[in-house]
Amino acid sequence: MGICCPACGSTKVKKNGHIHNGKQNRRCKKCGRQFAENPRQKLISLEKREQIRNLLLERILEFLGCRYTYRHNAASDGGLDG
Ligand SMILES: [Zn+2]
């Protein structure tokens, strides 16, 4: 059995029902952390990963751009303590 707690690495885990998608849920006896079996072993293609990265980057830039515009407008408005 190679199942161990992702949080503390303990192998003292017990079954704890199933999560919504039917995967076995487990709970660490040592630290109490709950986790599903193989939660991070998703195979994502390189193309998909690139897409997600670009999307994230777009969002981040959008977000930063909004903030910058907002601050810029506020500053050119004559200041806040006037
Ligand atoms: Zn643990």
Image (cartoon, grey):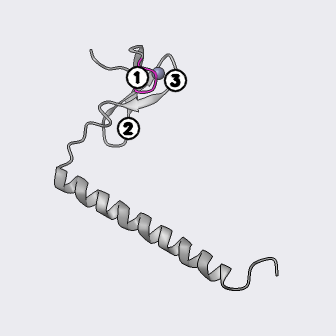
Label 3–label 1 contact, CB within 8 A: no
Q: CA distance from mark 3 to mark 1?
A: 9 Å
Report the residue at 81% width, 77% height from top: 81
Could you give the CA–CA distance between mark 2 and mark 3, rounded to whole angstroms? 16 Å
Say left or right for 28 vs 76.
left
Q: Does 7 appear in magenta?
A: yes
Displayed quadrant of residue 4:
top left
Bounds of the magenta segment: 5-9
Which residue sits at x=29%, y=58%?
A: 52
Q: What's under tag 1, amino acid-wise? A: Cys
Q: Would you name the residue on which mark 3 appears?
A: 32
Q: Main SS of the magenta segment?
A: loop
**SS for callout 1:** loop
Disc 1 Cβ-to-ligand 1 distance below 8 Å:
yes
Asked if ligand 1 lies within 8 A of label 3, the reply is yes
26 is higher (above) or lower (below) than 60? above
Task: Give the image location of residue 46, x and y in percent.
Answer: 18, 51
